[in-house]
Image (cartoon, coloured by chain):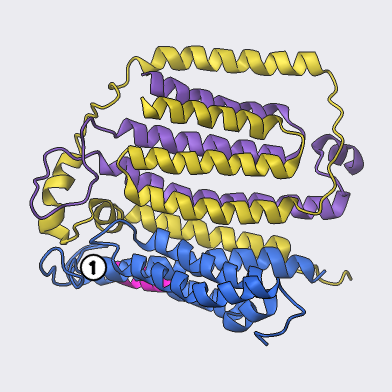
Amino acid sequence: MMLYFLCLVLFCVGLYGVLRKRNLIKIIIGLGIMEYAMNLFFVLLGYRFHGRAPIDAKDQGILNMVDPLPQAMVLTSIVIGLAVTALIISIAIRIYERYGTFDITKIKKLKG
Amino acid sequence: MINNSKTGMTLIVKTITRLTVGLILLFGIYIILHGHVSPGGGFAGGVIVALSFVHLMLAFGKDVAVAKVSKNMASNLESIGAMMFLLIALSGFLGGSFFLNVLAKGSPFDLLSAGTIPLSNIAIGIKVGVGLFAIFLALVVLERAK
Amino acid sequence: MELHILLIFMIFAAIIAIEEKDLLSSVIAVGAVGFALCLAFLILKAPDLAITQLVVEILCLIILIRATINKDLPLVIEGRWIFNTFSTLGFIAVFLLFAWLALKELPGFGEPIMAVVKKYLQESVSKTGSVNIVTAVILDFRAYDTLGEATVLFTAVIGIMAILRRPGRKK
């Protein structure tokens, strides 16, 4: 319960960065932090006390394993997150070449 | 070309890179191939393979890495990985449905077991590794060219 | 208990990453958050995720530093500072209040429901032959997810190459 709430506080730190900051790199960093918090929340939901990692061993049964389904979903989500971050950064590099700044308010002014 | 001292970092970095980059690539391939018997799999191993080429590019400059894997070769390999994964999926129709595991399962805890899962791991590994390397290549080479 | 400490460390590192003036320092603070997340995955018994998060974080740091190095730092003058900050903080407070109310309905930490996974855990070795159950789930039981992931990655690579390619001559 407290762990879930701390995880959402981490999400809100990223949300504050996205909503409040004007630097494009800071916005990308905020998006990354939100993604980390979301991945961690999924894995926290599947944890089980005194559980084992979801890999079979020869001499032990399958009685107390943690939930492998959120782990499988987060595994694809991490790689997609890297590709999406690279896509946003390439857009930011193009914006910097065109306008010479990372400040989003100035970009709007230059557009006219 | 690999001893050209004008591009890339200093001699110390180049020597260490020459010793370690093969081991990193080998470790990535190990992680891909053993995805069904130990932690790892196509995603993690693919990123490690991509990191070995990124390491080569950071140490020796972009020309050496591009000589190893050019941009056309990267896009071709990525298409091959995607088509291979789709072919494995379609081969499930031999048994009746999409993504069915048609090959023999073998005995657990062996390297050659689990039917189509190692093949899928190899396809995913090629796709993720070459795709991420292509992203890095685009970020470095295509931006500098302007 | 160690998870609490790790999460509080992640929150502080995230605040530093958001509020730091220097862009390179803030990128390094994001790296601290990512590696702490890798440790948290290890404590939560997810070794696959820990490996993947570690290597992805390294590549992400290289790309972020590549984007921010040699760029001059813009001096951002914040207009209407008090109004913007308090409206944002108020929104976040409302969000956290409703989250606190809603989190009580979730199953408690450490006691998942595991309705679907029970079948996967029992049948993974006999049906797929794979010892690693996470691999069995992503490549056999739920391979459609992986097919969608491959499509998204392909689209992202095509998008990056289209954005960063050399612009053609204008007519």
Chain drawn purple, letter? A
**Quadrant of residue B46 in the image?**
bottom left
Give, as a single range, the part of the protein colored magenta.
Answer: B81-89
Q: Residues within 10 Å of mark 1 (few under 14, many from 20)?
A: some
Where does label 1 land, which residue? B92
Residue B132 location (% of width, % of height): 54, 63
Chain drawn yellow, letter? C
Secondary element under disc 1, as helix, strand or loop, is helix
Q: Can residue A77 be found in the magenta stretch?
A: no
As shown in the figure, which amino acid type bears the numbered disc 1?
Gly
Q: Who's the residue at 73% across and 17% down the image?
A: C85
Q: Is residue A46 visible?
A: yes
Residue B128 location (% of width, % of height): 47, 64
Residue A39 location (% of width, % of height): 44, 38
Residue C35 location (% of width, % of height): 50, 44
Above or below, C37 against B45 in this view is above
Left or right: C166 in relation to C65: right
Q: Please name whichever residue, A81 or A65, is drawn nearer the observer in this view of the structure.
A: A65
Which quadrant is home to the N terminus of chain C?
Answer: top left
Task: Characterize the magenta stretch by its predominant secondary structure.
Answer: helix
Above or below, C114 against C123 in this view is above
**Callout 1: chain:** B
Q: Colour of chain B?
A: blue
Q: Is residue A83 visible?
A: no
Q: Who's the residue at 87% across and 49% down the image?
A: A99
Q: Who's the residue at 55% across and 71% down the image?
A: B53
